[in-house]
Image: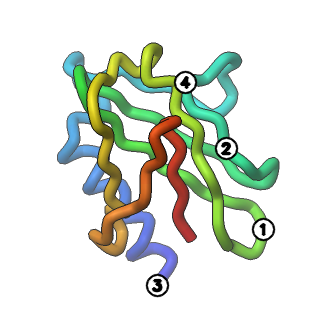
């Protein structure tokens, strides 16, 4: 099951353009990331294109809810934001302050 989840996430990243000149990548170890997480036991990979982003969140604990705070200016995003959990294809609530969360 875990390998299947990993393979599906990797396919989503490749389909989005990960690794191409059309995207920018932010790795969890970089300083001053454009997205912050509500949990210390989680890490993120951020892949952006003009007007959109894919964020992969992985935790090192028992799972559960994680909230994301997006710096829309650094991500070069404008207007009303929407978010989708790409694993379940379900919508994720996004607040007016560019915060969203998923379990």
Eye-nearest disc, 1 or 4? 4
Local crowd size for mark 1, using a 10 Å CA cut-off: few (<14), some (14–19), many (≥20): few
Residue bearing the label numbered 2: 37
Nearer mark to the viewer, of 4 and 3: 4
Asked whether residue 8 is in view, the answer is: no
Q: Label 4: which residue?
A: 34
Q: Which residue is mark 3?
A: 1
Q: Earlier in the sequence, mark 4 or mark 3?
A: 3
SS under mark 3: loop
Left or right relative to 9: residue 79:
left
Real-space CA distance between mark 1 and mark 4, rounded to the nearest whole angstrom? 23 Å
Dot 2 surroundings within 10 Å: few (below 14), some, or many (20 or more)?
A: some
What mark, if any, has residue 61 been given in the picture? 1
How many tags in the picture? Answer: 4
The colour scheme is rainbow
At a point 23% along the width and 20% down the height, the residue shown is: 50
* Position of residue 59 in the picture relative to residue 11 (left or right): right
């Amino acid at each position: 099951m875990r390998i299947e989840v990993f393979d599906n996430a990797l396919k989503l990243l490749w389909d989005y353009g990960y690794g191409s000149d059309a995207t920018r990548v932010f790795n969890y170890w970089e300083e001053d990331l454009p997205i912050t997480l509500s949990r210390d036991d989680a890490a993120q990979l951020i892949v952006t294109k003009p007007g959109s982003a894919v964020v992969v969140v992985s935790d090192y604990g028992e799972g559960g809810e994680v909230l994301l705070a997006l710096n829309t200016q650094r991500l070069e995003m404008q207007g009303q934001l929407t978010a989708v959990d790409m694993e379940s294809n379900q919508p994720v609530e996004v607040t007016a302050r560019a915060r969203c969360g998923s379990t």
